[in-house]
Amino acid sequence: MQLYCESIIEYKRLKTREVKIGDLLIGNFHPIRVQTMTTTDTMDTIATVEQSIRCIEAGSELVRITAPSKNEAENLLNIKNELHKRGYHVPLVADIHFTPNAAEIAARIVEKVRVNPGNYVDKKKFEQIDYTDAEYAEEIDRIRERFTPLVKICKEYGTAMRIGTNHGSLSDRIMSRYGDTPIGMVESAMEFLRIARAETYHNIILSMKSSNPQVMVQAYRLLIKMMQDEFGEIYPLHLGVTEAGDGEDGRIKSAVGIGTLLEDGIGDTIRVSLTEDPEFEIPVCKDLVKRYSLPNPSAGGASDSENLKLPYSAFEYQRRETFAVDNIGAKQVPVVVADLSKIEKITPTHLQSIGYTYNEATDKWTISDAAADYVFTGNQLLDFELPGTLKVIVYPDAWSSAKDKAKYFPIYSDKGFVEAAITSDKLNFVMVDCFSDETTINDFTYLDKLANNKSVVICLSSTNTNAMQSVRRMFAEFMNRKIQNPVVLITDSGWQTPDEHLIHFATETGALFLEGMGDGICLGYSGAMQLENVKASGRTYLEVKDIYQFTNNTAFSILQATRTRISKTEYISCPSCGRTLFDLQETTAKIRAVTNHLKGLKIAIMGCIVNGPGEMADADFGYVGSGPGKITLYKGKEVMKRNVNSEVAVEELINLIKENGSWVEE
C-alpha cells in the first residue's frame, strides 16, 4: 500500500474489513453505499417513516435518524416496525450525541448506532487543560468504563457502529493535547476503536468529517495510515463533508472533499450533507459514486512507475513552489480562464457571463468578484475595447495578427512551442497531455525544454478516464525534475447534467488544489451540456440558463471550497435533522440574502448545539439554535448574544458583524 491508498497513479479500491449492517454488507470491495439522514422530529413516527420512505425510494441504502434522548431512542422501535409493516427493510442508524443511555437503548433496536467520540463521554466547555500523561490515561479509563457497555450490547445484538469524529466537536481533552487538527480528529476516533477491539468487536465503520474539505481529506488519510500501522488492517470508511450548505456551493464543497478520496479508492459509504430535504441528497451521492462503476480505468504508463512516491506530504497542505509569470504562479491566487472559443462572434454582452458588465452610456466596465482573469477565444480577435483586468488567450496564428501584445497571449502544444519561430517574451501557455494513450515518462521529450522558461505557463490535462491521477503524476515528475513553471489545470467534462458536471469538475480539479497543485483553472466540455433544469422527485436542483456563467461560477466555487481563492461569503450550513430548532433552509436563505456581499467572511448557520460551537472554530460568526425560537450568536467560538428571539436574530447577527468591523455596504 502507498502512504494512504493502494495506488497514486491508477484507480484501485482500498481494501477494508467487511462490516454487516442488517443484511447490507459494507467494505471489502462491496459497492459504495449511499445514505442520508431524516430531518423530522423523531417522536413524530409517521412523519419520520414517510420521509424515510422518500429517501429509500430515491435510492438511500441506509437511513440515519437522530436519537438525542432516551425517548427518541425508544421510539425508533415504532419507526422500524411501521417501516417493516409498509414493506421497507433498509437498515436504520441511530445518531447519538451526549447520551450513552440513548445509544444503549437504540443498539438493541436498530441495525447501527453512530457515536461521536468528541461528546459521547467528554463534555465540551471550551476549556484548555494541561493534562499530565497520568491524568490523560485516567480520562481514557473513564471513557473505557462508559463506552464498553455499548460495545458489549452491539456485539450481543449484532449491531454495527460508526465512530464518527467531527472536526467541529472535538473534546476539550483532545483539543488540549492535539489542537484543532486532523491528527486530533484521528486520535479521537482511535481511542474508541482501541476500546472496541479490546472487546473483540469489529463491526465498525469510521468517519472524519469537517466543513473544511482540506482538513477532512488530511484526517481520512492519516486515519488510514494509523490503522494500517497499528492494526495491520483498515476498517470501512464513511465519507462526508459536514455543514456543506445548499445549492451549487454545497454540491461543490461535498464533491471536492468526498470526490478527492473516492478518486484514490477510499470510501465505502457516503453521505452528502446538504441544507435541503434529505431525499435530494441521494441523487448527488449517486452522481459521485457512479464515476467508479465504470470499467476499471488506467492512469496510463503505470508499468514504468510502480514505485512512484509522492515528493510532497499528502497529510498537510503546502502549495507547490513556482515562479511568477505575469499574474500566474508564486504566491498569487489561482487564476480563472474562461473558454468562449465555441462562440462564433464574441460581443461585450458575452463577457457578462464571466463577470464583466459593460455600460454603453458611461462606456465603463463593472467587474464582479467572480470575474475571469483570462478568456480563451481560439482564433478570434475581439473587435472591442476590453476591461482593464481581462486578458485573451488565442492560437499562435491569431496572436501573430494581434496588435495589442499586452492583452493577447499565445497557446501552443509542447512541440509547437519548442519549434515555434516566434513566441511571446512575456507569457506563453503550453499544453501538455499527461500520460494518455499509454504514454511513458520517456515520451515527454519537450519537458526539459519548457522547464523553467520564465515566460511559460504549462496547461496540464489528461484524456484518461481518471485523469486526476495522471495529472498528479505529472506534478510529481515536475517536482522531481525541479520544474517550477506555474500550471493551469484544464478539465473537460463529458457528462451531461449540471450536477454531473459540477461533480466532475470539483473532483478532478479540487483534489489537486487540496494538495497544493495548480495556479489556475480552466473548465470546458467534451460532451453535450443539457441546459434544461435538472429535476428529481419534482424538485429543481440547479437551473442553468447560461453555460458560460455556470462554468465560470463553478471554477470560482472550486477555488473557494479548496480555500485557495476566496471570492465570496462562505456559509457553513448544517443539514437539518430531528434536533434542528428552526427552519434551516429558510433561515440560510435569509442570512445569505443580506450577507452575500461580504467577501471572505465565513458565517456558520447551525440548527442546534451538537456541532454548533465547535464549528465556530472555522467560522467568523455563528448563528446557532439554542432552544425553540431562540438563537445564540457567536464570534468565532465566543458566545456574544444568548437566547435571541428568532424573529430578530438575523438583524442581531448583522448588528454583531457591524459591531466587529466586518460589515461593508453593498
Image (cartoon, rainbow, N blue to C red):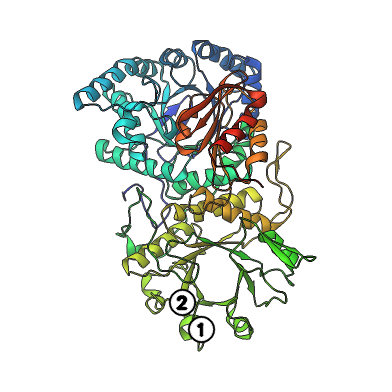
Among the 4 quarters of the image, the one containing residue 485:
bottom left
From the viewer's perspective, is residue 640 above or below residue 340? above
Q: In this view, does 143 lie above or below 590?
A: above
**Element at label 1:** loop
Which residue does the image show at 36% across and 44% down from the upper left? Answer: 221
**Residue 599 visible in the current orientation:** yes
Q: List x then y, in percent, for residue 632.
A: 55, 25
| Extreme residue toward the right, this view | 361
| Residue pointed to by mark 1 | 423
Estimate the spatial distance between the alpha carbons at disc 1 and disc 2, rounded to whole Å. Answer: 9 Å
Q: Nearer the viewer, residue 5 or 345?
A: 345
Contact between marks 1 and 2 (CB within 8 A): the answer is yes
The residue that label 2 is drawn on is 455
Q: Where is residue 383 in the image (x, y as percent from the top left)?
A: 72, 77
- The location of residue 516, given as percent across then percent down, is 41, 56
Q: Measured from the top left, where is residue 50 in percent x and y? A: 66, 22
Instruction: Judge left or right: residue 277 versus residue 545.
Output: left
At numbered mark 2, what does the secondary structure look like: helix, strand or loop?
loop
Which amino acid type is shown beneath numbered disc 1? Thr
In the image, 347 versus 229, the foreground residue is 347
Circle on res. 147: none
Label 2 CA crowd tier, 10 Å (few <14, some 14–19, many 20+): some
- The answer to which of marks 1 and 2 sits earlier in the sequence is 1
Disc 2 marks a residue whose amino acid type is Ser
Which of the 4 image quarters holds residue 450? bottom left
Which one is nearer the viewer's eye here, 512 or 78?
Answer: 512
Vertical arrangement, residue 430 with respect to residue 227, above or below: below
User: Which residue is at 51% across, 28% downward?
Assistant: 640
Relative height, residue 191 to residue 461 (above, below): above
**Residue at position x 61%, y 58% from top?**
494
The answer to whether any part of residue 299 appears in the image is no
